[in-house]
Image (spheres, rainbow, N blue to C red):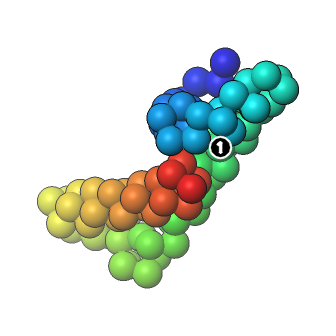
Amino acid sequence: MPQGRYASLRKTYLMQHHYGLYLNLLTQGKLNAHLTEIQETASRRMAQIIRQMMEIEDVSETLKANNPMKWTGLVNNIQRGAEEQILQELIYN
């Protein structure tokens, strides 16, 4: 069974909202592969989005050194936005 937050969220979503698809994947032996793919894709995509947004927002190591509180707030906002995008693109789709 794949471990990971995104795999778990996807499994729960399928069980609650797309039970037919969940059963098909399960009975065909494809559920674990599907969940593993979701977990890996979501993790890669999350890192990519965060990297891109940090570049766009100019959230740098210099900012971190000069104003750690501002840096922390910006990074937290970027992570929340990236997470929301991942949930919409991959988990609840």
Q: Residue at x 73, y 37 (%)?
A: 34
Image quarter (top left, top right, bottom left or bottom right) of the C terminus: bottom right
Q: Residue at x 84, y 26 (%)?
A: 28
Q: Is residue 86 left or right of residue 31?
A: left
Q: Residue at x 48, y 59 (%)?
A: 88
Q: Quadrant of residue 7?
A: top right
Instruction: Tell me the residue that label 1 is attached to.
Output: 38
Q: Quadrant of residue 40?
A: top right
The three-letter code of the residue at mark 1 reads Ile
Q: Secondary structure at mark 1?
A: helix
Residue 43 vertical position relative to residue 79 in the rendered view, above or below: above
Is residue 93 in view?
yes
Q: Is residue 65 left or right of residue 19?
A: left
- Could you tell me residue 59's position as x and y percent? 35, 71
The residue furthest front is 20
What is the count of numbered marks?
A: 1
Is residue 65 in view?
no
- Could you tell me residue 91's position as x and y percent? 54, 48
Q: Is residue 23 left or right of residue 46?
A: right
- Could you tell me residue 85's position as x and y percent? 46, 63
Q: Residue at x 33, y 57 (%)?
A: 80
Residue 80 vertical position relative to residue 43 in the rendered view, above or below: below
Q: Nearer the viewer, residue 53 or 66?
A: 53
Image quarter (top left, top right, bottom left or bottom right) of the N terminus: top right
**Disc 1: CA contacts within 10 A as few (<14), some (14-19) or many (>=20):** many
Q: Nearer the viewer, residue 12 or 89?
A: 12
The residue furthest top is 1
